[in-house]
Image (cartoon, rainbow, N blue to C red):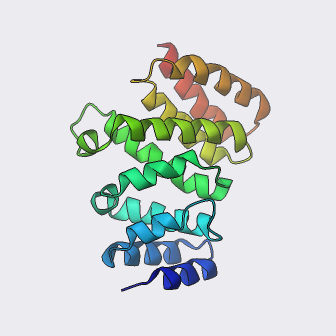
């Protein structure tokens, strides 16, 4: 079994290579160490962004095992993490919200509480306000907020001017295309 100190050591040595993130993310799930990994995702941790990278892989590869810890994961969205950590959390939120608001039945629809969805809203708006240098974060946060806006009426009136402001500030084609699709969807 991987111990917290061993996990922290592994994360401290981790480079951004996907193979290693997948290895640690898989090991964490197999050893039932998701709570330990989540505790290292916090702003107080010296390996928070590495922990978030591995949490993303744990979630993508083993969503059912990871969703058992969704409350602790959702609480991460209330922290001011760096853009590298928020990229992984934005990816998780993007996948969850898309499945949660899907017309097709999905287990996430029974698991995710309103409070957890509100944490996603907080984290996604935080990302749009503070991480304007990372277009992947902005695109995933924008898409998540679009989905969350289907439930929370106040989101679209806040999201539209935020997107319009970001469109004047960013020159990246990826975010511009993603944001334009969201604006079109909101306006139709």
In this rendering, the answer to whether 120 lies above or below 24 is above
Instruction: List x then y, in percent, for residue 69.
Output: 35, 58
* Residue 157 place in picture, x, y as percent: 57, 16
Residue at image point 63% right, 63% down: 44
Q: Quadrant of residue 122?
A: top right
The quarter holding residue 105 reads top left
Q: Is residue 69 above or below residue 8?
A: above
Viewer-side residue, 7 vs 136: 7
Position above or below: 107 against 33: above
- With 126 as the anchor, is 35 left or right in this view? left
What is the tally of numbered marks visible in this picture?
0
Q: Residue at x 71, y 30 (%)?
A: 166
Residue at (46% x, 45% y) in the render: 93
The residue shown at (48%, 79%) is 4
Residue 42 locus on image (x, y percent): 57, 60
Q: Quadrant of the N terminus?
A: bottom left
Question: Which percent across, then down, holds residue 83?
Answer: 67, 53
Toward which corner of the image does residue 40 lie, by quadrant?
Answer: bottom right
* Nearer to us in this view, 147 or 179: 147
């Amino acid at each position: 079994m991987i111990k917290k100190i061993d996990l922290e050591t592994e994360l401290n040595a981790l480079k951004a290579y996907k193979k290693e993130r997948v290895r640690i993310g898989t090991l964490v799930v197999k050893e039932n160490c998701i709570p330990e990994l989540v505790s290292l995702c916090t702003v107080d941790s010296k390996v928070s962004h590495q922990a978030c990278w591995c949490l993303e892989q744990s979630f993508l590869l083993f969503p059912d095992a990871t969703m058992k810890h969704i409350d602790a994961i959702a609480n991460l969205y209330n922290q001011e993490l760096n853009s590298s950590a928020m990229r992984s959390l934005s990816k998780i939120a993007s996948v969850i919200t898309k499945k949660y608001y899907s017309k097709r039945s999905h287990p996430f629809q029974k698991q995710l509480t309103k409070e957890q969805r509100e944490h996603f809203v907080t984290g996604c708006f935080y990302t749009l306000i503070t991480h304007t240098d990372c277009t992947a974060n902005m695109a995933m946060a924008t898409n998540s907020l679009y989905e969350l806006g289907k439930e929370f009426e106040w989101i679209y009136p806040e999201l539209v001017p935020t997107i319009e402001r970001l469109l004047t500030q960013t020159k990246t084609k990826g975010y511009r295309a993603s944001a334009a699709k969201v604006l079109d969807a909101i306006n139709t």
